Amino acid sequence: MKTTKKLDTWHRTKTGLFIMCLVELAIAYGFASLSIDRGNLWWYLLTIIFFIGALQNFLRLIGAFFHGK
């Protein structure tokens, strides 16, 4: 339980948001590659999910820079 709380606390920092954004973009790129190669709709769905997650982290990071959180 403490490990997930530590991860959540770290994820809310600027560094955590940046790294998680990059990780989610890399995962989305991998799923996009698989979806184009194999044409499976599930891979497209996973690509969209991870891309939206990366976009959310990026917007939170921008907000943290402007609001100083």
Image (spheres, rainbow, N blue to C red):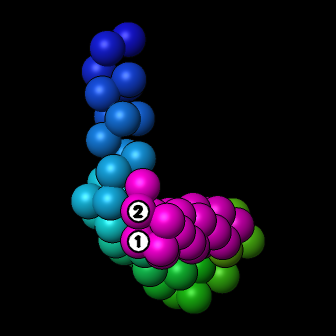
In this rendering, would 5 be left or right of 60? left
Q: Name the residue rendered at 38%, 11% in the picture.
A: 1
Q: Residue at x 64, y 63 (%)?
A: 49
1 and 2 marks in contact (CB < 8 Å): yes
Residue closer to the observer: 35 or 68: 68
Q: Amino acid at mark 2?
A: Gly
Write down the residue under mark 2.
68
Q: In the rendered structure, which amino acid carries the disc numbered 1? A: Phe
Q: Nearer the viewer, residue 40 or 50?
A: 50
Rendered image: mark on residue 65: 1
* Label 1 neighbour load within 10 Å: few <14, some 14-19, many 20+: few
Location of residue 2 by image quarter:
top left
Q: Main secondary structure of the magenta part?
A: helix
Disc 2 residue crowd, few under 14, some 14–19, many 20+, Cα 10 Å: few
- The residue range painted magenta reads 45-69
- Name the element at disc 1: helix
Q: Secondary structure at mark 2?
A: loop
Mark 1 and mark 2: Cα distance apart in space? 5 Å
